[in-house]
Amino acid sequence: INIPKTASFTDYSDMSIQEKNGKVVITSQEDSALWIGQMVGIVNGKLDPDLLGFDEDVYDVYHFPKSDTCKTKYCNIEGIAFINDDMIMAVSDKMKGKGKQSYRCLDKDQSIHAFALPYV
């Protein structure tokens, strides 16, 4: 299954699907962003490989919060999961050392983050 063009990120770090409704989230570490959309082909919590895909018309793209100076601070998002329909939980990997990442990434490394999703 191809990732939708609307989720055109530099890289992809994780994906999570809600079995009950097919809501899906895809994260990008490099872009510090996430794509939330809808999968089709999930019936009663089971995947139908013949129908599985993405609804190309149902999606939103969000960026993780920035610093006060509009710099990336969630630099290493490696995992994502739905808490419920309105919240997600993300986990950050260790900051890359030896000057490979800005010091501002240190505050959020190796930690768990919970976010409320905007109502649309």
Image: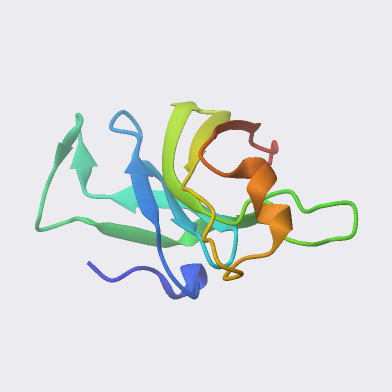
* Direction from residue 44 to residue 18 in the image, left or right: right
- Residue 22 drawn at (x, y percent): 34, 40
Quadrant assignment, res 103: bottom right
Q: Position of residue 94 (x, y in %)?
A: 48, 48
Q: Nearer the viewer, residue 26 or 58?
A: 26
93 up-or-down from 29: above or below: above
The quarter of the rendered structure image containing the N terminus is bottom left
Q: How many marks?
A: 0
Quadrant housing residue 108: top right
Q: Position of residue 117 (x, y in %)?
A: 64, 36
Residue 18 lies, with reference to residue 40, above or below; the image says above
Spot occupied by residue 93 in the image (x, y as percentages of width and height): 46, 47
What residue is shown at x 28% (from left), y 71% (from top)?
2
For residue 15, side relative to residue 105 (left or right) = left
At horizontal 52% and vertical 54% (from top left) the residue drawn is 76
Q: Identify the image's colour scheme: rainbow, by chain, secondary structure or one colour.
A: rainbow
Going 55% across and 67% down the picture, which residue do you hit?
Answer: 98
Identify the residue shown where x is 28% and y is 32%: 19
Tell me: 53 left or right of 119.
Answer: left
Query: Does residue 103 sit above or below 99 in this rendering?
Result: above
State the quadrant of the C terminus: top right
